[in-house]
């Protein structure tokens, strides 16, 4: 067995017996913590999870079996040896049924205790080894992710290995690849999981409000600040602050963010009081952050502060069979939500999915599947149900179009006027404005149909406004 001393938690309320057992176990080189009551034991186990537990079933404050149950709920691999008085073997059997590893009947010798304990620890280390192997095996789900490809296994491993630390993680990847899913997974896999995960999207919040969104403000700090407001940084205290679309943050605010990262101190807008907060930073962008630095839009010093651990999410088209794993899961979810019978894709549909480029990645696939399920019913999704960019295969599946069929038919992108060439930005603007009109200015819905993220639309709207154009076509 390993060379590290094992941590044993002894739960025994009779002091002389406890002293004796501790002596037995220390002689074997174990580290022993002692608790006299069930409550004390549970607190000790929480503060420092033991490798093995010796549990006297008769405790002053709780049922021994309840302590056993709670310990095993917290850690199913924990080896618990129960101790019972002579003549109460029935309880010991009951304890075994509840998952105790073995039992000892009082009085017992040092040998008997240590042999039982050794077996228990052996079993635990085997269980751990199995766990480790399982972890190294390919997983097809990990927190919010679906995917078994080697590319995603690497993502899962990175998340797992950085989760415990406080180091900043910088997530890159195309739109819709799961950057937010990754940020949440980092939080959930970390010791901070019991504290808040707060996402702050720099692209979705008007620039002049962003500082107060991050740092909070006091009443009267500016027109409209009618009450104190706690910012994202303070809300995330003890937890994780996710700086989404961080490259969109205005340059001057980047300096304030940098100071916050360096000092852990925030100053709400309009306040003279500084507050200390403890957050772990995760940042994301779908841009190339180094290029943003080179072109002077993103502060180099901030980049290096945040870019401690890079995590890149591969585009969906590079994830092999994951395309179908995700598609099938989406189909099942969608069918259930929409009350449809779909259970599978026809082979030619799966082939079309596999060969599609998915420029909008998983979000685009969600929209395609949703569209199919809403517009059709049946048990199998057949090729005729596919929206046009996927139908027909071949070259047309490359670079799937941005708008779904209905919106495309009469869109300005329709190549009816083949003679004239319109600038790309103009086409994009027209398309977005048209989608907004068709969706009665419901940005998330328009974004969903355009298969882009709502933040992209917000960003464009801001940009057009800044360019001195109200945004109507
Ligand atoms: N591997 C995956 N398995 C299942 N669902 C996924 C996976 N990756 C992402 N999703 C889902 O796809 C959608 C988009 O993911 P997410 O918002 O995390 O992407 P993003 O990279 O932040 O996109 P953007 O750059 O547009 O903000 C979400 O609904 C998310 O739950
Ligand atoms: Mg995102």
Image: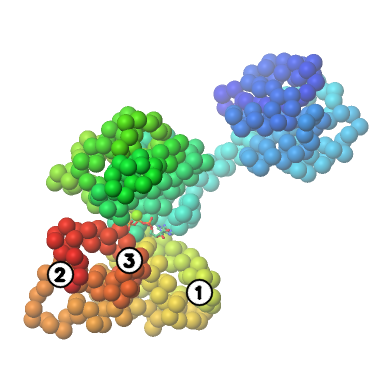
Q: Which mark is residue 426?
A: 2
Q: Which of labels 2 and 3 is toward the front?
A: 3
* Mark positioned earlier in the residue sequence (2 or 3): 2
Q: For disc 2, does the CB lie below 8 Å from ligand 1?
A: no
Q: Position of residue 17 (x, y in %)?
A: 79, 19
Relative to 26, say whether 389 is above or below: below
Location of mark 1 (residue):
338
Question: Viewer-nearest of labels 2 and 1?
Answer: 2
Query: Ligand 1: which quarter?
Result: bottom left
> Is residue 318 or residue 306 the one in the foreground?
306
Q: Which is nearer the eye, 393 or 185? A: 185
> To which quarter of the image does residue 469 belong?
bottom left
Quadrant (top left/top right/bottom left/bottom right) for the C terminus = bottom left
Q: Depth check: 227 or 328 in front?
A: 227
Between the C-alphas of marks 1 and 3, the distance is 22 Å
Task: Report which residue position mark 3 lands on.
Answer: 443
Residue at the image point whose x is 59% and y is 29% from the top: 47
Rendered image coloring scheme: rainbow
Residue 419 seen from this side: yes
- Residue plotted at (35% across, 57% down): 177
């Amino acid at each position: 067995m390993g060379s590290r001393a094992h941590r044993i938690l002894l739960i025994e309320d009779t002091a002389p017996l406890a002293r004796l057992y501790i002596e037995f176990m220390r002689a074997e080189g174990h580290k022993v913590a002692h608790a006299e009551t069930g409550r004390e034991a549970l607190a000790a186990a929480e503060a420092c999870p033991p490798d093995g537990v010796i549990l006297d079933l008769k405790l002053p404050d709780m049922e021994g079996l309840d302590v056993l149950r709670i310990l095993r709920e917290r850690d199913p691999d924990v080896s618990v040896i129960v101790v019972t008085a002579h003549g109460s073997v029935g309880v010991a059997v009951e304890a075994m049924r509840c998952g105790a590893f073995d039992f000892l009947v009082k009085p017992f010798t040092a040998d008997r205790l240590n042999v039982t304990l050794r077996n228990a620890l052996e079993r635990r280390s085997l269980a751990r080894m199995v766990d480790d192997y399982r972890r190294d095996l390919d997983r097809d789900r990990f927190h919010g992710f679906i995917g078994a490809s080697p590319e995603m296994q690497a993502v899962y491993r990175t998340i797992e290995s950085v989760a415990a630390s406080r180091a900043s993680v910088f997530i890159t990847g195309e739109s819709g690849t799961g950057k937010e899913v990754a940020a949440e997974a980092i939080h959930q896999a970390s010791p901070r999981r019991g504290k808040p995960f707060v996402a702050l999207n720099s692209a979705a919040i008007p620039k002049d409000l962003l500082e107060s969104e991050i740092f909070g403000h006091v009443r009267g700090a500016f027109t409209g600040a009618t009450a104190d407001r706690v910012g994202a940084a303070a809300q995330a205290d003890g937890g994780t602050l996710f700086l989404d679309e961080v490259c969109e943050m205005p340059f001057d605010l980047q300096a304030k963010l940098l100071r916050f990262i360096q000092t852990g101190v925030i100053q709400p807008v309009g306040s003279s009081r500084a507050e200390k907060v403890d957050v772990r930073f995760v940042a994301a962008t779908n841009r190339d952050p180094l290029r943003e630095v080179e072109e002077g839009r993103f502060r180099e010093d901030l980049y290096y502060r945040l870019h401690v651990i890079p995590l890149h999410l591969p585009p969906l088209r590079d994830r092999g069979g994951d395309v179908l794993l995700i598609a099938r899961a989406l189909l099942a979810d969608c069918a259930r939500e929409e009350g449809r019978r779909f259970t599978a894709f026809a082979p030619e549909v799966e082939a079309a999915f596999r060969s599609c480029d998915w420029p909008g990645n998983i979000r685009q696939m969600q929209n395609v599947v949703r569209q199919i399920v809403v517009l059709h019913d049946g048990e199998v999704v057949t090729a005729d149900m596919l929206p046009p960019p996927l139908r027909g295969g071949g070259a047309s599946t490359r670079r799937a179009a941005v708008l779904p069929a209905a919106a495309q038919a009469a869109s300005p992108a329709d190549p009816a006027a083949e003679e004239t060439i319109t600038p790309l930005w103009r086409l994009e603007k027209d398309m977005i404005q048209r989608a907004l009109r068709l969706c009665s200015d419901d940005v998330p819905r328009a974004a969903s149909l355009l298969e882009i993220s709502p933040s992209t639309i917000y960003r464009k709207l801001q940009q057009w406004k800044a360019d001195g154009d109200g945004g109507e076509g």
